[in-house]
Amino acid sequence: SAVKEWKEFDKSKVYMADLESGLHYLLRVELATHKTLEGEELKTFKDFVTVVAKLFPGRQAVVKLLETLLEWLVSLPLGKIPYDAVLDLVNNNMRISGLYLSDTVQWVGCQGSSEALRGYPCSLWTLFHVLTVQAAQQPDALANTGLEDNPLAVLQTMRRYIGTFFGCQECGKHFEDMAKESLHLVKSLDEAVLWLWRKHNQVNARLAGSMSEDPLFPKTQWPTPDLCPSCHEENEGLHVWNEAMVLTFLKQHYGATNISPKYTS
Ligand code: FAD
């Protein structure tokens, strides 16, 4: 395919174009590999749509689309739905609202030096960091959804989504292992934000130098000192994180006011 023009971006920002492109890919490409949704898969998809419809700090038309999808899923008496029905609803609503979750994905903060690198998996991490931060900042957002009062709601939903639908099965397996080991230790919405950060760094460490590393975006322990100097400390010559500062940083970085609308159509 044609070489896309490089889009200038700021590493200290999150880009709405990445989040919307990720949702587009998830709804129209990844889900399409499942011809029907039923049982646990349907439940997982419903919970995923619930979490994004309630917590995604997106543009009005996108949130409206997610809410419509959720209402429809909740109202369905069926235990089984064809994927084509999901697609019709998404497409029809996009036509009505004039919203164009563009067909060509637009990666910005998630653009890679080749088509095979970064992109969708990067946007999925970004989305879930945004969602854990939103959940911590608006603890009542999930009221009356069946997911309220559970500090693990977002992470459990992510875990099940990744395990059921994420195209990279090896990733799903690794993530499941990490969740089994320590997710039960998470007792608050703030701890959920930190858990995802810690696990993402664990994945970064495992993948450093591997085939999935983009040479332009080396895997690092994040946030690097240039992004958050106060997150880093030294104890007897060894690096340690200041987790209180990391939490503050994550809430700022993945908070709604740090999401740039640049490059959204
Ligand atoms: P990503 O790791 O995708 O990160 C995206 C952005 O998030 C970064 O650019 C940075 O701004 C920010 N960020 C980085 N670290 C953190 C952090 N600790 N906390 C918060 N924000 C951070 N690939 C494999 O090859 N094997 C696997 O087993 C594997 N498991 C995965 C499991 C999950 C749940 C997901 C979503 C992806 C997995 N991937 C795996 C893909 C891999 O983690 C990367 O997403 C992919 O290689 C693209 O990397 P990237 O450079 O865009 O950065």
Image: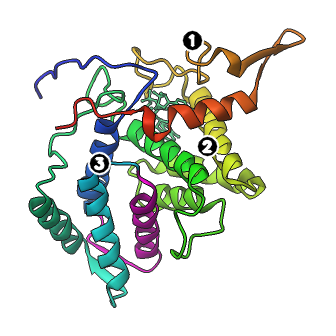
Q: Is the residue marked by circle 3 packed among few (<14), some (14-19), or many (20+) residues within 10 Å?
A: few
Structural distance between the alpha carbons of marks 1 and 3: 30 Å
Residue drawn at x 14%, y 49% is 100
Quarter of the image where one finds residue 240: top right
Residue at the farthest right position: 236
In this rendering, which labeled residue sits more in front, label 2 or label 3?
3
Helix, strand or loop under label 1? loop
Structural distance between the alpha carbons of marks 2 and 3: 25 Å
Q: Is mark 3 within 8 Å of ligand 1?
A: no
Q: Residue 77: x and y, percent?
A: 34, 91
In this rendering, which labeled residue sits more in front, label 2 or label 1?
1
Q: Is residue 220 magenta?
A: no
Q: Which residue is mark 1?
A: 226
- Which quadrant would the C terminus be assigned to in this image? top left
- The first of marks 2 and 3 along the sequence is 3
- Left or right: 53 as drawn, with respect to 24: right
Q: Is the residue marked by circle 1 packed among few (<14), some (14-19), or many (20+) residues within 10 Å?
A: few
The circle drawn on residue 196 is 2
Q: In front: 44, or 192?
A: 192
Q: In front: 115, or 126?
A: 126
Quarter of the image where one finds residue 54: bottom left
- The first of marks 2 and 1 along the sequence is 2
- The first of marks 1 and 3 along the sequence is 3
Quarter of the image where one finds residue 1: top left
- Left or right: 258 as drawn, with respect to 186: left
- Left or right: 41 as drawn, with respect to 226: left
Numbered range of the magenta stretch: 33-56
Q: Which residue is mark 3?
A: 59
Residue drawn at x 9%, y 60% is 95
